[in-house]
Amino acid sequence: ELSGNMIDLCPVGALTSKPFRYSARTWELSRRKSVSPHDSTGANLIVQVKNSRVMRVVPFENEAVNECWIADRDRFSYEALNGEDRLTTPMIKQGGQWKSVDWQTALEYVANGLKQISAEHGASSLGALLSPHATLEELHLSVKLMQGLGSNNIDHRLRHAEFPAAEGVRYLGTSIASLSELQSVLVIGSSLRKEHPLFAQRIRQSARKGCVVSSIASAHDDWAMPVAHQFEVPAAQWVQALASVAAAVALEKGIPAPVAVAASDTAVAIAQALMAGERKAILLGNGAAHHAQASSLLALAQWLADQTGASFGYLTEAANTVGAQLVGAQPAPGGLHAGQMLGGALKAVLLLNTEPEFDSAAGAQAVEALGKAQMVVSLNPFKANMAFCDVLLPVSPFSETSGTFVNAEGRAQSFHAVVQPLGETRPAWKVLRVLANMLDVPGFDFTSSEDILQSIAGLTSGAPVQVSPDRLGNRTTAAINLNAHADAPVVAGIYQLDGIVRRAPALQQTADARAAGTPEVAA
């Protein structure tokens, strides 16, 4: 997951990048800064380009974020950007056959379809499923478009099993850099090394300095660091295990526990580690965020943090999970959440940069449910969702558009396009703007992604741009429920996370991809 960094470290150039080897001379490449679109680190990149084609990706040093490292999926996923599966022209399905059309025809078809369905079934029959890998600007315009049409059916939480009302923008709860200086850390529901390789290497730095690492998970793979205390229990028992740690802290401090459970020996050891030292964190992984009892896990983490002085927060799944929350990419009261929309509750669905079959908890069932809708529109860089979509609109991946990602600590990092859009591909924010104008939705007079960013509330001015502290918050008023039924949460494998990594040949040939049984998509 980090092995590609050996290429940069090799002092004599003997270790080289196999996908890049013999494809270009170094002096032929232009170098442009960008930001990783994959996990929530927001790794800074140098994208090297020749003839408007991405040829290589290497790290750009930023001590506060990724230091001088990048994960292998940041380094090698660019292969998908040049793959045969790229969608390069708008397409409409007519009589069961896909036909290429021009942009005007495609957008008029979508606009007329949305108007007709809204008139026949009401605005509540429209909805949008948005990827947390989309840019802040794309997410913001998607939300504005749906709300302008009168629908609150908007969500980015595609792999979640619980959908509580928003209480704050969930985030890491501390800075990324602080993960390198921890004295104690408890990680809940995460395959840390695979899901967040760069966070794992920072915690590994802490472990080498004596940090006590503890975890609660269904299984413990090799984290390449000493894990002092491991609570290995099925996902249905994670709340019970965390409550046991809380009971041990309560016993140690002589105060009432938040819920009445026994404190096991492992729980006592974890509690003692959390109560020692000054720099400590409780981190909820992707499994905890997607858990059917996610609110109970958060409430217990909050109680533990209050009693031990630790920070608490989410590692967060994707490049823009925090940004999606900031712009309100989840349903307002009365709106349908992702689980309901993926269950077939809509007549018209807008899919932004997502493939529900692979990106949602519904999995294959999403294909059947969405196939019953009258109109499904896919905005995607790839030939995706063809089994159930009616319209395919080719939108730019991160390399062909400007935009902003907000990482796990709430840092907003903007970037520019590094190459020209491929074929008839267009940036998604431009597509959404034109579509909104066709639908007579007001407030879409933007001429650049920078204009859109300036219109988004909740960001600080100056450098670095951050989500305003008053918007960030992990505190919850949720009750702790020990008895709810909970299936295993849906968590993407390291090379299943998004459509780009799923289509990168080098990544799909790795042992991790083969072991996870990554769904085959064209490359």
Image (cartoon, rainbow, N blue to C red):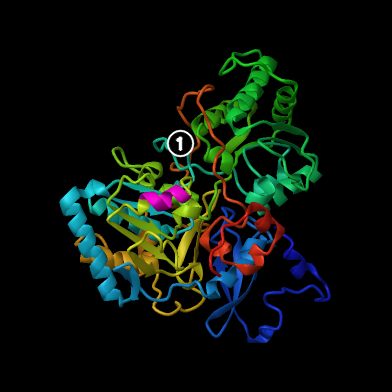
Q: In the shown orientation, is residue 295 left or right of residue 14?
A: left
Q: Which residue is mark 1?
A: 162
Name the secondary structure under disc 1. Answer: loop
Residue at horizontal 57 percent and vertical 43 percent from the top: 286
Residue range of the region highlighted in magenta in the rendering: 364-369
In which quadrant of the rendered view does residue 375 lie?
bottom left
Which residue occupies the foreground of this view, 26 or 101? 101
Could you tell me how many numbered marks the image carries?
1
Indicate yes or no whether the magenta region holds residue 365: yes
Determine whether 118 is above or below 444 in the image.
above
Q: Residue 355's x, y, as percent?
A: 45, 57
Q: Residue 99's x, y, as percent?
A: 33, 75
Q: Quadrant for the C terminus, please.
A: bottom right
Q: In the shown orientation, is residue 498 left or right of residue 16?
A: left
Determine whether 396 is above or below 21 in the image.
above
Q: Residue 522's x, y, as percent?
A: 53, 68
| Callout 1 amino acid | Glu
Farthest residue to the front: give it: 95
- Estimate how packed mark 1 is, as few (under 14), some (14 to 19) or many (20 or more) residues with alpha carbons within 10 Å: some
